[in-house]
Image (cartoon, grey):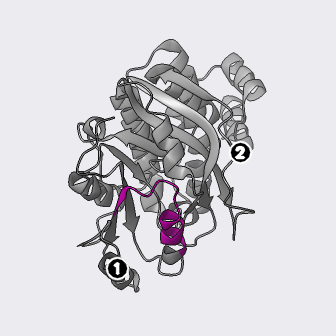
Amino acid sequence: MKKNNCFNITIIVPVYNTEYYLEDTISCIKCQTEQNFELILIDDGSTDNSGQIIDQLAETDSRIVAIHQKNSGQAAARNVGIKHARADVITFIDSDDLVSPLYLEHLLKGFTTPDVEITSIKKESFLIKPHELKSSHILWIKKYDSKHFLNAVFFHNDDLYYVSFWGKAFKSSFLKSQVIAEGHYYEDMANIPVIISNAHTIMLLNSQDYFYRENREESTLNSFNEKTCNDLLWALKYIRKNVIFNKKLEKSYNILLFNNISFIWIWCIKNKRNYRFIFSFLDRMSFNSMLLMSLKTHVSRKGMLLWFCHKLHLI
């Protein structure tokens, strides 16, 4: 792939109140086997010392760019980073996560032909510290068109197929042509399926190189409230509006829908809110499709309970 401004890859890291994790994240990046990178750190209006930390890092390494903005959310920070990226390939890392030394090298290896626009690797979640940051070997590389890869993401949503910007690399010219919606929680869930659907070819590498921190109190998953409830609904509708579905993709999308709608249901019950609007989502699923879904992949038990209670007119 043609190199732009001497960098092989741009790493974009949105930063918001992660002073306790940020230096570990940057340390992992600096230990990459691929050293020809540009690192863009965007302080998204942090109220702790994160902004000062990224300024200090930029002063000591010419590859690092520090940008500050008022708090606008991860998608807005990513859009700023994309605008400033100078390499022909762009990847993302969250400011509280960790990566193996081969993270960049493996992502770049997936760009084997000009039609490849996205590469993706395996992730692992951890609570306090991962067991190790050693990368697994690349045992295989699979080539997908957009429909087949997105079907796998909807169907599995696991450590290989997931809806996140991190853990993936994008051809810069392709990513800069995409619209990334801002101003919501669940921005990854909304935007990534649409971006995947617009790609020509995706390469999946089964090397485990990204380590996702699960337990941070400020993370979206740990702060479910009325705003996040509404934004989860927005994300599910955004996918529906902006992805062209075929019959197979329709079925796998229902799994993603089903596994997330129970969060909204439970929140509505706990907060004594009307939840009958949820049924319009559930009514599209037949008994046979629900049974087949539960046999083939993981489905939310709470979601199953909700669906059966609705069908038996218990709620």
Above or below residue 24? Residue 280 is: above
Question: What are the residue bounds of the magenta stretch?
Answer: 24-39
Q: Residue at x 34, y 85 (%)?
A: 52
The label number, if any, that marks residue 124 in the structure image: none
Q: Residue 56 lies in magenta, yes or no?
A: no
Query: Which of the 4 image quadrants contains residue 217?
Result: bottom right
CB-based contact (under 8 Å), mark 1 and mark 2: no
Q: CA distance from mark 1 to mark 2?
A: 50 Å
- Horizontally, residue 111 falls left or right of residue 56, namely right
Residue 102 placement (x, y as % from top left): 57, 52
- Horizontally, residue 17 falls left or right of residue 10, namely right
Determine which residue is flagged by label 1: 60
SS at circle 1: helix
Q: Residue 29 lies in magenta, yes or no?
A: yes
Q: Residue at x 29, y 65 (%)?
A: 72
Report the front residue among 61 and 150. 61
Determine which residue is flagged by label 2: 302
Residue 87 placement (x, y as % from top left): 29, 48
Q: Amino acid at mark 2?
A: Lys
Q: Quadrant of the C terminus?
A: top right
Above or below residue 39? Residue 44 is: below
Above or below residue 135? Residue 113 is: above
**How packed is label 2: few (under 14 Cα within 10 Å), some, or many (20 or more)?**
some
Residue 192 placement (x, y as % from top left): 42, 40
Residue 183 placement (x, y as % from top left): 31, 56
Query: Which of the 4 image quadrants contains residue 128?
Result: bottom right
Query: Which of the 4 image quadrants contains residue 270?
Result: bottom right
Does residue 160 appear in the picture of this structure? Answer: no
Outermost residue to the top? 247
Q: Amino acid at mark 1?
A: Thr
